[in-house]
Amino acid sequence: MTHENDIDRTFDRLVEAARQQDGAAFKAATQDYARSAEGQAWLQGGHDRYQQIKADLQARAQAPQPGGSDSSPTSGPASGPNSGP
């Protein structure tokens, strides 16, 4: 059976289970897909993507932030029309 046929078969099973409001059949179809080679590859891809996003977020959190506390707009000498003596 080809990859497309597997996906079509799974989709048909899900649609039929939904039409019949058969939660057990819907669950069985999703579990069968998750156990298949295609399902495992899809799950691994999602896991890999999650790990990459997690690493990116951790790197951002640890990176120095531009415009730290030394460069705030109110930290320098006052200027403007009302700042004179």
Image (cartoon, grey):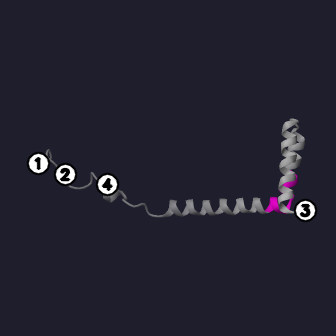
Q: Which element type, helix, strand or loop, lies under badge 2?
A: loop
Residue 16: x %, y % from top left? 87, 41
Of mark 2 and mark 1, the one earlier in the sequence is 2
Magenta stretch bounds: 31-40
Judging by the rendered image, the residue that carries numbered circle 1 is: 84
Judging by the rendered image, the residue that carries numbered circle 4 is: 72
Judging by the rendered image, the residue that carries numbered circle 3 is: 1
Q: Type of residue at label 1?
A: Gly
Q: Type of residue at label 4?
A: Ser
| Distance of label 2 from label 1 (alpha carbons) | 8 Å
Q: Can you say whether 15 is above or below 76 in the image?
A: above
Q: Is residue 32 magenta?
A: yes
Of mark 4 and mark 3, the one earlier in the sequence is 3
Observer-side mark, 4 or 3, equals: 3
Of mark 2 and mark 4, the one earlier in the sequence is 4
| Distance of label 4 from label 3 (alpha carbons) | 64 Å
| Distance of label 4 from label 1 (alpha carbons) | 21 Å
Residue visible at 60% across and 63% down in the picture: 55
Residue 59: x %, y % from top left? 54, 64
Q: Type of residue at label 3?
A: Met
